[in-house]
Image (cartoon, helix red, strand yellow):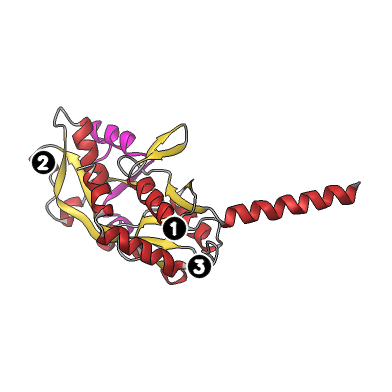
Amino acid sequence: MWRDRLLVSVCFSMLSLAVSAETLRFSYWIEAAPPLAFKEEGRLVGGIIKQIGDAIGEQMDVPVEYVELPVPRIEPYLLDGQIDIDCITNPAWKHDPSKLDWSPALFDGADRFIVRSGKDSSIDQFTDLKGRTLGIYNGYIYHPEIMRMIEEKEVSVVKVSDVTKALHLLEMKRIDALIDFGVILRYQLQQFNQSGAFALANKAADSYQLFCAYSPKLAIGDQGSEAFDTVIESLVSSGKIDAILKQYE
């Protein structure tokens, strides 16, 4: 009897592995906010990350799933194959990007500062940050000059957990600025800034291209990362990625 149970257990485990190997697992980070990520009851239900992932899965004819992770865990999970793809990222944000495979560029992005409205709160150059308190996310890597200023304590920092709470801290003058994806901050201003209390600073915090990072263990059937490159190139050249972004302008 125990042999029969063992056989059933082994077969079930093999079946689970086979199903997992044919499912494309995308990561997204806990702090991801609209329009990058819309969440309900802990699940990703919409937004740019999901729309891009769904489009890739549809082109590959492979089901997709989305795994929420703290930023520091994403790279280790990619390296050991627990997730397959991390999109909306950049090699400069990884500790060892050479160990990952990288897609063609998806689109151009930028980090922006959001500040309280008014001349006294404006940021026109990085030196304007000196003596101020900056809201940052745990595990994020920002522009090298900002990271230097943080390391040398030219600016104070407060770790924030999401953009809504960070804006509350900004309103209460607990922080002087928040850094986040420009697409997120523009969306927040459109949705929740009817009073005009907040504004984007003139100075951008950084600019970059955004990519998908592939696990070195990525394999769906007999398809490797080159097949995914072809799909992403097609989504970019066809205007599909631009069409997704324009929904949130």
Please say whether residue 246 is visible from this viewpoint. Answer: yes
Q: Amino acid at mark 3?
A: Pro
The image quadrant that residue 120 belongs to is top left
Q: Position of residue 100 (x, y in %)?
A: 45, 67
Left/right placement of residue 30 relative to residue 6 reads left
- Of discs 2 and 1, which sits in the foreground? 1
The residues tagged by marks 2 and 3 sit, at their Cα atoms, a distance apart of 48 Å
The residues tagged by marks 3 and 1 sit, at their Cα atoms, a distance apart of 18 Å
Q: Is residue 126 above or below residue 247?
A: below
Residue placed under numbered mark 3 in the picture? 216
Q: Is residue 124 above or below residue 191?
A: below
Q: Earlier in the sequence, mark 2 or mark 3?
A: 2
Q: Position of residue 181 (x, y in %)?
A: 27, 49
Query: Is 76 within the magenta?
Result: no
Mark 2 neighbour density, 10 Å: few (under 14) some (14–19) many (20 or more): few
Q: Earlier in the sequence, mark 2 or mark 1?
A: 1
Numbered label attached to residue 120: 2
The residues tagged by marks 2 and 1 sit, at their Cα atoms, a distance apart of 51 Å
Q: Earlier in the sequence, mark 3 or mark 1?
A: 1
Residues under numbered marks 2 and 1 in contact, where contact means CB atoms less than 8 Å apart:
no
Farthest left residue in view: 119
SS assignment at label 3: loop
Residue placed under numbered mark 1 in the picture? 60
Farthest top residue in view: 195
Q: Position of residue 200 (x, y in %)?
A: 16, 44
- Of discs 2 and 3, which sits in the foreground? 3
